[in-house]
Image: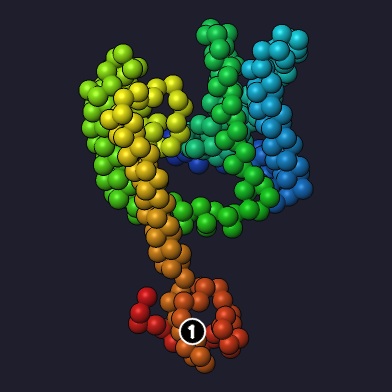
Amino acid sequence: MNRPRQGTSPRWSARATASEERPLTPKRALWYDIIFEADTPAGKAFDVSLLLLIILSVVAVMLESVEGIRAEAGGLLLGVEWAFTVIFTFEYIARLVCVRHPSRYALSFFGIVDFLAILPTYLSLFFAGTHALLIIRVLRLLRTFRVFKLTRFMGQATMLAVALKSSREKIIVFLGAVLSITLIMGSLMYLVEGPENGFSSIPQGVYWAIVTMTTVGYGDIAPQTILGQVIASFMMILGYGIIAVPTGIVTVELAEAARGSREVVTCGSCGTKGHNADAAFCRRCGAPLGDVIPSDNP
């Protein structure tokens, strides 16, 4: 017979277990299907309506940031913003009420995003300008993948994430090398040009080096001496070569990830390797892949 842990009463344990399970009543189960599921007509209609409201709220926040529009329709946009916030607040509370584990939802990615989507409006009552953070509502559009059955794109996103993760060491080394070059060249330009030509400090020279190496070239700082212009020319040419490095790194890792996502099998008819895991026929000869030969070479 199992005994309760020391210091824990049986009544408290039973109450905790019941609280953790939190069975859904029929009404809460109905609202759960509408709010969290997109397989039913009501659930899909709810999700589509919610996505439209999110888009409209983001557009309202963007329009409110335009000075001319804010001067003419600032009051209207403020009312619209509060209306959207109230709707999203009730929606967030409804999600907490109808789920089996409210704390688990509140601490999940979408739970945090849903909370942050309503928080800036209330913060604007105490801190001016925080309502601009409502643009974070655009993250709620990620539910589009679930609503419109676009989960097949998540496989491609996973492949990209795998490629970036695999290449992170190379990219870190590359960024470290670029940072070292910009520090050295920025300091050199500070010594060559000096404050009289706009290079008033080493950080200012590093800023110029970054702008030049990335081929942005704002033109707010430019070398005036011949030696400085020679250094700038070298930085520009170096920048074109550096831009291609991370692209090549990620491309190679993407190819490796794509190769790893294929089932390494050989067609028993023509010997073609590397078919997709769900392929039924050979992509070269069209023979059925029911009797495939495992390949030794990945």
Instruction: Report the residue at 40% width, 31% height from top.
Output: 211
Q: Is residue 183 visible?
A: no
Quadrant hosting residue 214: top left
Q: Residue 62 location in percent, x, y?
A: 65, 23
24 in relation to 150, above or below: above
Q: Quadrant of residue 32?
A: top right
Residue 288 drawn at (x, y percent): 58, 87
Relative to 148, is 282 above or below?
below
Q: Is residue 41 visible?
A: yes
Q: Secondary structure at mark 1?
A: loop
**In the rendering, at what x and y percent does residue 205 appear?**
30, 24
Q: Position of residue 193 (x, y in %)?
A: 28, 21
Q: Residue furthest bottom?
A: 269
Foreground residue among 280 and 183: 183
Q: Quadrant of the C terminus?
A: bottom left
Rendered view: 216 above or below 199:
below
The residue at the point 46 percent across, 53 percent down is: 160
Q: What amino acid does circle 1 point to?
A: Thr
- Pointer 1: what residue? 272
